[in-house]
Amino acid sequence: MTIYYLLLICERFHDYPHLNGQLFKAGFILVTITKVVGVAAVAAAMIMPRPLGAATAERGALAPLFIAFALWSLLGTLAFGWPLPAVSLSYLISLSLLMAATRSLVCTPGRARNVIRVGVLAAGLATAWCYKQYFMEGAPRAWGVGLDANYEALSMVMMIPLAAWMACAEGARLWRTVGALAAVSLTGAAFLTQSRGGLLALAIVGLAALLRARRKPAARLALLAAFGALLALAPSSLWHRFESISLSGAPANGDEMAAQARLELIVAGLGMVESHPLLGIGLDRFKAVAPDYDQRLRHSGASYIAHNTYLQVAAETGLPGLALFAALMAAGFGNFRAAERRARDPALAGLAAALRLGLLAYAVAGLFLTAEFVVWYWLLIFLSRNLREIAAAGLSLESSQFPATGAPHFERAAAPQAIRYA
């Protein structure tokens, strides 16, 4: 499990400090530090036996759906004879390794909780770069360790519900404190990125949390107070970015130009879907061919990605690829909802709800960002099936205080817990 947790940390910092730099090339595969750790995690998952007390693994549609999505994504590229895109292929390989390791290793409540702890801790530490860039380097927008303000905001907004869950549901005071500090730090750093898509996703997640806390007046007041404070302390340039959303007329600044370009990209993307509805135009080709589908983009001489995950997936992999992508997201939501309903432990049910809110953040932000290969999104999808099985087995976070390895100790310690939770 230590190797798996190291993999999660490497994924969070894979762009900075350049952990994802190419070590060497094996054929057409880019070998990076993250991939080496991923292979080691999969090897450990294959070698190590399942711990006693693990939830029973059941057959489900998640793995076949992901395999179908990955293969279909490559089919259009191969069918038209385009060269395989090294970056996208590298991501698909990394995600396959992550799925295999997650499916096999994260099979107890304790391991699921530790995944959240590692993710929140790494995300909280990563916010230091945002504060450094904004307050010490004078950057107008913080871009964080992800080297892009929009994707950094998405990564942080997805983690905020999990940090909040830690602050409320962790048994140890240390981890509650870590969760509370991380939630505050992540939320503040998300505002410093001034990502409109990320902050809209944060607002939707906050609204969903308010609706869920309708029977908890104190929680609702705390959420409202937190949002009020954030709105009051937010940089003034953030509101200027929202005011600069103009879809017509001559653009007066870069924000207005970006808003109008996104409208043109929607037209181009829909044209791609109409002309190649089955196989799409091929992976990583949206940016190159977008000017061919919109005259204004051709005249501007600029090229962009879709800035819409669903549109880019549909354009590059066809409508079947979009259907598979949507089915995976729906499976994630369904699994978390089922885990929340089946869990006997309120803390485990709360974890499922927090993960569902993180998935909601991605679903909303995906309307404004091309983010089909964001690793934490796929980790949530892969975790969803495991958490559903853990909840269905009636396992509890409180009963997972024992080491995941070391069978004799586990057997001695588990007996009284089994009686308590019978």
Image (cartoon, rainbow, N blue to C red):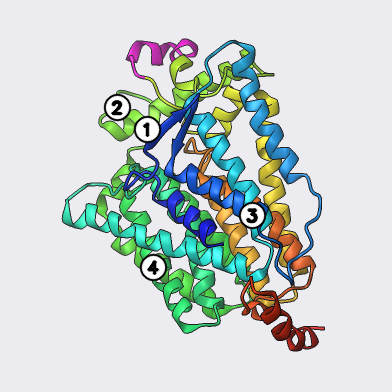
Element on which disc 4 rests? helix
Mark sitting earlier along the chain (3/4): 3
Which residue matches tag 4? Answer: 184
Residue at image position (54%, 78%) is: 170
Q: Nearer the viewer, residue 49 or 174?
A: 49
**Contact check, label 2 and label 4, Cβ < 8 Å:** no
Q: Residues within 10 Å of mark 2 (few under 14, many from 20)?
A: some
Which residue matches tag 2? Answer: 251
Q: Nearer the viewer, residue 85 or 253?
A: 85
Mark sitting earlier along the chain (2/3): 3
Spatial CA span between label 1 and label 2? 8 Å
**Contact check, label 3 and label 4, Cβ < 8 Å:** no
**Residue 106, horizontal then vertical, whole percent:** 64, 60
- Disc number lying in front (2 or 4): 4
Which residue matches tag 3? Answer: 45
Label 4 amino acid? Val
Q: Nearer the viewer, residue 9 or 220?
A: 9
Which residue matches tag 1? Answer: 246
Residue 61 in view here:
yes
- Disc number lying in front (3 or 1): 3
Residue 400 position by quadrant = bottom right
Element on which disc 1 rests? loop
**Contact check, label 1 and label 2, Cβ < 8 Å:** yes
Element on which disc 3 rests? helix
Range of the magenta residues? 291-302
Mark sitting earlier along the chain (3/1): 3
